[in-house]
């Protein structure tokens, strides 16, 4: 079954219900939303875009994002959402690697570099003409057919395309309604975080239930604007990274605003300080749910319910609040030792998952697939433990992954860029704990290049959010007897500061 059927059903059931909004302004009702998406699908067919072809979206959050997304699905194509914060060179690699036929962009971004795909601005006359094209019927799709190709950075420095199918997204959506939160037509889902990631992949069950899809006029996350929209719209739900929750709470407390129109905040994407979520619940009330997932098992490994997040009566409530909750309905979660055998409750080991939301593999990368999927289990690379009640606690993250402001940053990507400078002999990148961002990127550099030159080089070659916040010049890097850099020593130095 094609996910686009959910839009068609919502449009048939409540055609005049508001669907797409910018701030408080209604852009389209459900009948118009569905008609535009079907017209875009017709325009794809006129361009000989066939079921299974890829359509990339490299754009800021805007209502047209969803129109293009569902247009692609109606035509049977798969979408390749690209993080708008990526450098055009990085976006170009994704477009080329995925074999994208057409890329949608917004004019405020530099288009992807290289590649042969046609590029269309979502706010151009060309896209408006596509929205007025003769519509086409919804293409049939099987549960295993590709729907969403999500590129996640890898430790090799090259992004890997996670194949997310129609069946996976349907299972994820139904699990959300069962394990995370219910959704009704009265709700307004607010897209203040990038739609290429968790915020956007959560659109489907809101479409299924005929909810409002709201885009802040600012185009991003502004805590004051979000508070105003909660008051104006009512029943607001949204996804936030922990950094966003902290800023939102600070703004609300400074204004004396309890965000009475707020219904639910789902937080994920990085470690949440217990003190921060306790303060947020004390101020806003029981309106928070945590989820844990990966691109390879999107948003659907575990969930910590709003009851658990708000509970202060259970004798182990602090431990539970520090966990990421219990397994969602559509997956099994276990802890395995180095030998691949299950470990008892309380013992730390690698978190493994299997179930309906596990990817079938990476895009045209059988080697990486074989390393990640073994004996039916997804090896997450994260270290954690399960207690007797099934609560999962993360004790470490996959290798050296840095999570800053909810965005994943692999140090090797940054290191490889810096090592292309002649004055850089060696470099090691680590994360430093930060109260605002969770972590910041710090580069230890051996060589004579000044910090200004290092930063300018990163700015020209990688996304801004991946650039180090600090460059520390060192005469050499600490290494073990095998010549491996001891990043633990570098982190220790930062901690001692």
Image: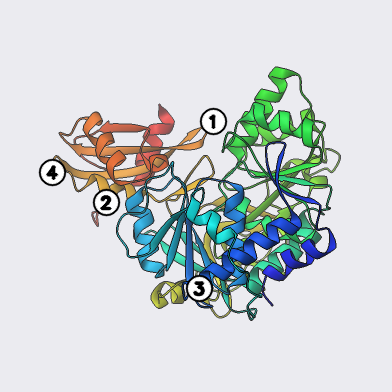
Relative vertical location of residue 193 with respect to residue 136 in this rendering, above or below: above
Q: Quadrant of residue 348?
A: bottom right
Q: Secondary structure at mark 4?
A: loop
- Label 4, label 1: how many angstroms apart (C-alpha)? 34 Å
Residues marked 1 and 2 touching at CB (< 8 Å): no
Q: Which numbered circle lies on residue 46?
A: 3
SS under mark 1: loop
Q: CA distance from mark 4 to mark 3?
A: 50 Å
Q: Is residue 47 left or right of residue 189?
A: left
Mark 1 or mark 2: whose residue is earlier in sequence? 2
Badge 3 crowding class, 10 Å Cα cut-off, few under 14, some 14 to 19, many 20 or more, is: few
Q: CA distance from mark 1 to mark 2?
A: 27 Å
Name the disc covering residue 416, or none. Answer: 2
Left of 154 or right of it: where is 46? right
How many angstroms separate mark 3 from mark 1 (CA)?
48 Å
Residue wearing tag 4? 422
Nearer-the-camera pick, 129 or 481: 129
- CB under 8 Å between callouts 4 and 3? no
Residue labelled with disc 1: 436
């Amino acid at each position: 079954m094609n996910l686009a059927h959910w839009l068609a059903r919502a449009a048939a059931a409540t055609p005049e219900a508001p669907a797409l909004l910018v701030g408080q302004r209604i852009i389209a009702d459900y009948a118009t939303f569905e008609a535009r998406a079907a017209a875009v699908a017709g325009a794809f067919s006129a361009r000989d875009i066939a079921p299974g072809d890829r359509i990339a979206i490299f754009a800021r959050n805007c209502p047209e994002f969803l129109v293009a997304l569902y247009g692609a699905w109606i035509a049977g194509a798969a979408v390749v959402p690209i993080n708008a914060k990526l450098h055009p060179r990085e976006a170009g690699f994704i477009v080329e690697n995925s074999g994208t036929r057409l890329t949608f962009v917004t004019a405020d971004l530099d288009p992807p570099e290289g590649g042969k795909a046609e590029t269309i601005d979502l706010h151009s006359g060309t896209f408006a003409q596509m929205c007025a094209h003769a519509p086409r019927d919804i293409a049939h799709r099987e549960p295993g057919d590709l729907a969403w190709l999500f590129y996640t950075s890898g430790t090799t420095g090259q992004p890997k395309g996670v194949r997310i199918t129609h069946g996976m997204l349907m299972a994820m959506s139904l699990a959300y309604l069962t394990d995370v939160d219910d959704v009704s037509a009265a709700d307004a889902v607010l897209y203040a975080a990038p739609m290429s990631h968790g915020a956007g992949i959560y659109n489907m069950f809101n479409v299924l239930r005929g909810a409002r899809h709201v885009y802040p006029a600012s185009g991003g996350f502004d805590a004051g604007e979000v508070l105003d929209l909660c008051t104006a719209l009512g029943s607001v739900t949204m996804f936030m990274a922990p950094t966003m929750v902290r800023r939102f709470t600070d703004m609300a407390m400074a204004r004396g605003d309890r965000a009475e129109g707020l219904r639910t905040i789902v937080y994920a994407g990085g470690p949440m300080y217990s003190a921060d979520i306790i303060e947020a619940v004390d101020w806003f009330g029981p309106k928070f749910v945590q989820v844990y997932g990966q691109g390879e098992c999107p948003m659907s490994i575990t969930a910590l319910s709003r009851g658990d997040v708000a509970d202060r009566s259970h004798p182990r409530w602090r431990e539970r609040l520090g966990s990421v909750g219990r397994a969602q309905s559509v997956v099994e979660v276990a802890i395995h030792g180095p030998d691949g055998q299950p470990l008892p409750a309380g013992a730390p080991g690698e978190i493994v998952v299997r179930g309906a939301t596990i990817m079938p593999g990476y895009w045209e990368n059988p080697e990486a697939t074989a390393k990640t999927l073994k004996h039916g289990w997804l090896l997450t690379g994260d270290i954690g433990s399960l207690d007797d009640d099934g609560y999962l606690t993360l004790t470490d993250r996959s290798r050296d992954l840095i999570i800053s402001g909810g965005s994943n940053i692999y140090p090797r990507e940054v290191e490889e860029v810096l090592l292309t400078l002649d004055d850089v002999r060696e470099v090691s990148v680590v994360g430093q704990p930060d109260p605002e961002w969770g972590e910041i990127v710090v580069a230890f550099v051996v060589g004579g290049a000044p910090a200004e030159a290092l930063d300018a080089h990163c700015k020209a070659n990688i996304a801004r959010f991946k650039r180090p916040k600090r460059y520390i010049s060192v005469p050499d890097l600490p290494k073990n007897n095998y010549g491996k850099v001891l990043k633990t020593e570098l982190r220790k130095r930062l901690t001692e500061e």
